[in-house]
Amino acid sequence: MITEPELTGASGGEPLRRAGADGQLADVVQDLGPRPGLRGVRGSGRGGWLWGALAGAAVASAVWAGAASAAPPAGRPDLHGFRIGFSPCAGGTFDALVRAVGGLAGTAAPATFSHGPALDGARCTFTVRSRPERGAVTEYAVALAVDLHRRTDPRAEFQQEAAVDPDTLAVADTATPLADVGDEAYALALQNRTELLKVLRGGAVITLRLTSTTTAAAPSKEAGPDPSADSDPDPAPNRLVPALADAARALLVTLAQ
């Protein structure tokens, strides 16, 4: 019968030993003495091998635990460390838009927030005015919505409604997919000089709605002709989508900080 070898000295500070065939006690692991970190290890080759194996197992376990904790629970979206606790319209989110329209500065209205175990949300608006051109000034207003889904993955709904205006539920004539913006992104050209960008990244859904309104500038001695006579009511649809895409990228970086 094979029996468990007898071990002695395990609790009294003595080297761990087992009984050999001749009845003598042989060292299993010799006393390694002081061991600062993993350096200066003393003892037999077998002892060094055992301590190295234990250290390797500990490191492997730590790496596995870190990888397991980083993965989202089954059926839940990856949050990528996102959190909503600030105005998404503040800071430099819309710097690219300000440059694109030739504005001097923009104004961000205070944001509103909602927080819950399944969904966090933020809503805010940002406006910027262009420099006077041909006697007219154009004001660009962006309505920004951020929804962070904590429990259910929004990908299926996002893909199903990629071409749908979330405010009116109208289907856009075109929904152009964009690369390098989140996991998926679509640009929609809507009526009334409205451009819409929808972005999905893990559990986050970002919607940017841009509308523009052109009005006559204050009269001056050097004012140009009335822009209402020859202006295009819907100039260059989606011409500001690249600026909105830059805003979405900037926002995703900020959400993860």
Image: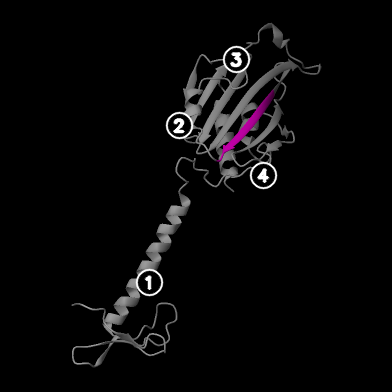
For the magenta stretch, what is the residue range?
A: 140-150
Residue designated by label 1: 55
Picture quadrant of residue 55: bottom left
Measuring 59% from the left and 29% from the top, which residue is drawn there? Answer: 207
Q: Secondary structure at mark 1?
A: helix
Amino acid residing under circle 2? Ala
Q: Closer to us: mark 1 or mark 3?
A: 1
x and y percent of residue 183 in the render? 47, 35
Q: How many marks?
A: 4
Residues tagged 1 and 2 counted as in contact (Cβ below 8 A): no
Q: Secondary structure at mark 4?
A: loop
| Disc 3/disc 2 C-alpha distance (Å) | 24 Å
Q: Secondary structure at mark 3?
A: loop
| Residue 174 on the magenta segment | no
Amino acid residing under circle 3? Pro
Q: Secondary structure at mark 2?
A: loop
First in residue order: circle 4 vs circle 3: 4
x and y percent of residue 156 in the render? 47, 29
Image disc number at residue 85: 4
Q: Closer to us: mark 3 or mark 2?
A: 2
Mark 4 is surrounded, within 10 Å at the Cα level, by few (under 14), some (14 to 19) or many (20 or more) other residues, namely few
| Disc 2/disc 4 C-alpha distance (Å) | 28 Å
